[in-house]
Amino acid sequence: MAIEERLRGVFVESLQLDEGAAVENLKYRDIEAWDSVGHMALVAAIEDEFDVQFDTDQVIDMSSFKVAVDMLRGMLDG
């Protein structure tokens, strides 16, 4: 399964979105569930799903679904 598909599932589950929700253009604070607490839960869920560990700067910089995809590609491909 592609990174985007797996990550989409994490976003949907972690932020309690409808299965058909468009997450590809989602940005931090676009929705009520993605506040600071939701962000930390999302980061933890991504780390668990992909068996990675984000550093502090990456956690702070993860401002959208697209940024998260790019970060994961860099971590998993390199």
Image (cartoon, grey):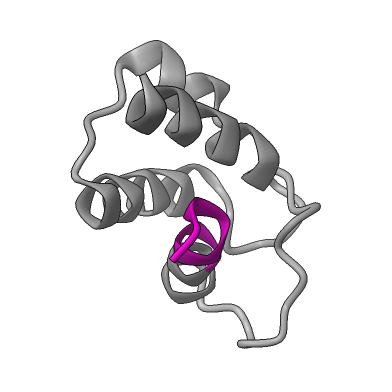
Q: Where is residue 77 in the image (x, y as percent from the top left)?
A: 39, 28
Q: Position of residue 67 (x, y in %)?
A: 63, 32
The answer to whether residue 47 is seen in the rendering is: yes
Q: In the image, residue 18 lies at what x, y percent?
A: 64, 87
Q: Is 13 located above or below residue 36 in the figure?
A: below
Q: Is the magenta stretch mostly helix, strand or loop?
A: helix
Work out whether residue 59 or residue 66 is closer to the camera in this orientation and state it.
66
**Residue displayed at 30% across by 56% down:** 45
- Residue 16: x and y in percent read 51, 78
Q: Nearer the viewer, residue 77 or 17?
A: 77
When asked about the image quadrant of residue 69, the answer is: top right
**Vertical placement of 21 versus 63: above or below?**
below
Q: Classify the position of the N terminus by image quarter.
A: bottom left
Residue 68 inside the magenta-drawn segment: no
Residue 7 on the magenta span: yes
* Residue occupying the point 48% across, 32% down: 73
Tell me which segment is drawn in magenta. Answer: 1-8
Q: Is residue 57 left or right of residue 28?
A: left
Q: In this view, does 38 lie to the left or right of 20?
A: left
Q: Which sits in the foreground, 29 or 46?
A: 46
Residue at image location 72% in from the left, 78% down from the top: 21
Identified at 46% across, 54% down, the residue is 38
Quadrant for the C terminus, please. Answer: top left
Q: Nearer the viewer, residue 22 or 29?
A: 22
